Amino acid sequence: MKVVIIGGVAGGATAAARLRRLDEQAEIVILEKGGFVSFANCGLPYYIGGIIPERDDLLLQTPESFYRRFNIDVRVNQEAISIDRATQVVGIRDLASGREYTEPYDKLILAPGAKPNIPNVPGLDSAQVFTLRNIADTDSIRGFVDTTKPHHATIIGGGYIGIEMAESLMHAGVGVSIVQRSNHVINAIDFDMACQVHEHLRDKGVDLRLEAPFGGVREQDDKLYVLLDSGSHGGGDADDGGRRDDGLGGEELATDLVILAVGVHPDSQLAVDAGITVSGAGGIVVDEHMRTSDPNIYAVGDAVVVNDLVTGTPGQIPLAGPANRQGRIAADNICGIPSRYTATQGSAVLKAFDLTIAATGINERRAQAAGIAYDKVYLSPASHAGYYPGSSALSLKLLFSPENGRILGAQGVGLEGVDKRIDVLAVAIRAGMTAADLTELELCYAPPFSSAKDPVNMAGYLIENVLAGRVRQYFWNEVATLPRDGSAQLIDVRSFGEYQQGSIEGFANIPLDELRARLGELDCTKPVYLLCQSALRSYIAARILMQSGFAEVSHLAGGYRLYTMVSEQ
């Protein structure tokens, strides 16, 4: 059997290694358009800024090491230019010599990955504008930074790559602006969870421009001027460069280099040309065995269509973990092992300076788009026992089904302990677990690592209380519409000192520890809206009132902490 694999990195390289472990006699050929077959593309931003000092640390395998260990014929700088499905032959161009030749196959695996999105705006042909996809891009950016010593960089896009590049460049002494079209960074999380990230980025010196459509680049005297829409607002010390005089009312942001990080799309043109079925968005359509519409051709990685685990809808979720699993599954099926790839849930984690941001499952935007009914809870527990030094608050948000409490999605932001909680919740989502199941999880505990009631358990308890009607919630975006005409009672149950430091208009202060003694000051026939710092004390207050004859009692989900974080954006 002869297997040709188009593309290396995660999916293609994994498929090749698995094929060899399953079939020592198979002839395996990898065709890689770039100069490197297997590299840590998730580590590329960190090398650019010197956080990872050695370039070779990014190279996981070379053609020589692949051959020595796996007896695999790896050909770099070889571009697959055609697929003849009738004769099962791949047309190839040697990019070094220009020579064209063909390679027959019995089975073919497509692992072309994804290509950076390039906005349709002027000025992107400048030598000071870069994208980041592979080692060659990395070398170009690192070379520019080392040679020209830029003072400032502008990153277009506030996703994973954009945030990682911001941290890495600032580590190298380069000032950074991030230009983001939407109202928050990191598409996988919701606006309210991203607000803490915004605050942290600005505290670290990043000039963050939200709701700032990118209009292009103008180059003048070795300086670039990034064109921004007039609606942009930031917070930092970047040189804005002045207003434009084109009548559009926007700004020009002066910078030394621009990095485009506005997402990716499937690199599927070869499949399209071969008549293989692709989606409307260009993703290669595969079955659960990673087989395309041609039974002898498989596809894996960022170029394929996958089903969302929670919504069941198809789409592209370009992540390294799924690509590796898909490569293994394709190899299994080629070798007669009926492995299946079920769905992707989008579990991902990001380091943003001192913060960890992680998410799994769906967020509110995706739930609404899919028409899925959901409710949500917020909590801000300590990362480990509060009496042990170094504890800090986590911000967690969970989406769940109001019908049965099944966990639909989770997001976390904090200084430590975020990744392990979201990992546990990722397993819970994969297993179809409910809030009741979360309460029963027996997780590791010692004061330096957690609390006796882990935040995951606490999330389960909180959801159970909501489902059982033991507490009602209102949310940060509903505060402004609360009645302030005397028809309802707005009560802040924080301490007097906390209340004096800042409060929400219309809320009177009755500290929790005084509430039982002051019940006579309240009218049990009127609705009561409670708040505290994190929603723990307001929950206790709600239980007191609900058991004292007050029929309509709600508390602010996420508390004053979340409300102020969002309202200050």
Image (cartoon, grey):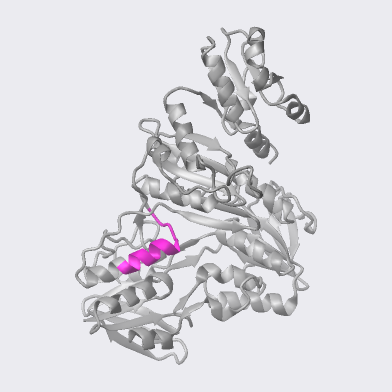
Going 40% across and 86% down the picture, which residue do you hit? Answer: 75
Q: Nearer the viewer, residue 41 or 421?
A: 421
- In the image: residue 240, left or right of residue 324: right
Tell me where residue 254 appears, x and y as whole percent.
76, 62
Tell me where residue 230 appears, x and y as whole percent.
71, 48
| Magenta range | 315-328
Tell me where residue 14 appears, x and y as whole percent.
37, 72
Going 21% across and 80% down the picture, which residue do you hit? Answer: 87
- In the image: residue 345, left or right of residue 513: left
Residue 321 shown in magenta = yes
**Would residue 334 be seen by someone viewing this image from the given angle?**
yes
The quarter of the picture where the C terminus appears is top right
Going 37% across and 87% down the picture, which residue do you hit? Answer: 67
Q: Nearer the viewer, residue 524 or 98?
A: 524
- Magenta region, mostly helix, strand or loop? helix
- In the image: residue 163, left or right of residue 27: right
Tell me where residue 292 appears, x and y as whole percent.
27, 65
Q: Nearer the viewer, residue 240 or 447?
A: 447
